[in-house]
Image (cartoon, grey):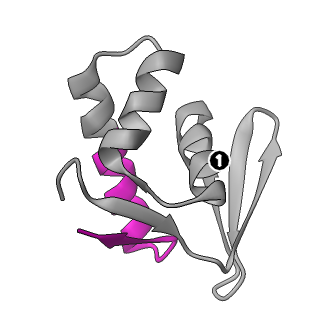
Amino acid sequence: MDSETVIARNEDIVAREVGGETVLLDLQGGTYYGLNEVGGRIWAMLETDSHSIAAICDVLETEFDAARGELEADVKALTADLKENGLVSLTG
């Protein structure tokens, strides 16, 4: 996975914000997942369209006080976890 990898959310996932956390429900599996503020922001971007890791990091860099390298590592780690759980698909 590199910075040009494009992430698209699974259409069978419902998301809601609850107490500052984004909660995802996999409608097929009936499993809940929780995302922190940054993860929730990433998910919000994916709800409107698919985005590359680089594009997501561009947005996060303007909204959060974190180094680019740290953002990329965190986005890639979250993406891998979301992919492993069937919540997103990757291309590129």
Q: Using the image as rendered, state which of residue 92 and residue 69 is in the foreground.
A: 92
Q: What residue is drawn where x is 33% and y is 30%?
A: 71
Residue 68: x %, y % from top left: 27, 23
Measured along the vertical axis of the image, is residue 1 above or below residue 12?
above
* Viewer can see residue 35: no
Is residue 79 rendered to the left or right of residue 43? left
Residue visible at 18% across and 59% down in the picture: 1
Q: Mark 1 is on which residue type? A: Ala
| Residue in front for this viewpoint, 18 or 43 | 43
Query: Circle 1 sits in a helix, a strand or a loop, which is it?
Result: helix
> What is the x, y in percent for residue 29?
63, 85
Residue 49 appears left or right of 67 = right
Residue 15 location (% of width, % of height): 74, 59
Quadrant of the rendered image containing residue 74: top left
Residue 39 lies in the magenta stretch = no
Q: Which residue corresponds to mark 1?
A: 44
Q: Quadrant of residue 23?
A: bottom right
Residue 58 appears in the rendering: yes
Residue range in magenta is 75-92
